[in-house]
Image (tube, rainbow, N blue to C red):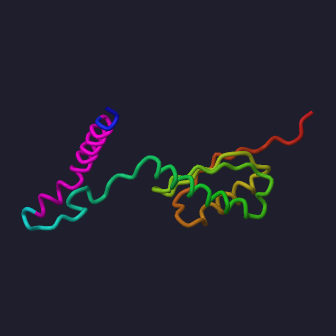
Amino acid sequence: MKLRHLVVSSGLALAAAAFAYTPAFAADAVAAASGSSVSASSVSPSNPAPSKKSVRAANRTFSKTVQKALFRTKGLEDTTIAVFGNAKTGHVTLAGQIESDDQEGLAVDAAKKVQGVTSVSSKLTLREQGGG
């Protein structure tokens, strides 16, 4: 009985696997029957839309590149600047707190020098001094 169960379940698994792969090779079978070759571009769209995951990864990488440039800029050591970048458009938004207005100019200039940056928007605010 166990052998029979094993044979039947193996046969079902094999049949399911065969049906799962059939659509992938259907275009090749049709092309082979007609005598022409099928390229990948004729089966799928030539420029598939990028996935959300790849867009987010590109934006993160782009933002980190700008963040590193800001970190290396003299005069921005004591700042807390967050970078939000769009890798597709090249737009960068800087947000956070700075000590002086000069630091805002330094940050914007440093961001503009990064390859791929087309525009910079500053949402930087002056940190309040002292208290008491």
> Which percent across, then down, holds residue 8?
27, 37
- For residue 87, side relative to residue 97 (left or right): left
Q: Residue furthest left?
A: 34
Image point (74%, 48%), residue name: 80
- For residue 16, side relative to residue 71 (left or right): left
In this view, 17 is above or below 105: above
> Which percent across, then down, holds residue 129?
85, 42
Image point (31%, 32%), residue name: 1
Image point (54%, 61%), residue name: 117
Q: What stretch is highlighted in magenta?
A: 5-32
- For residue 128, side relative to residue 6 (left or right): right
Which residue is more in the foreground, 9 or 81? 9
Q: Is residue 86 magenta?
A: no
Kindly indicate the quadrant of the structure image that contains residue 68. Answer: bottom right
> Which percent across, then down, holds residue 120?
57, 55
Which residue is more in the foreground, 6 or 44? 6
Image point (66%, 57%), residue name: 67
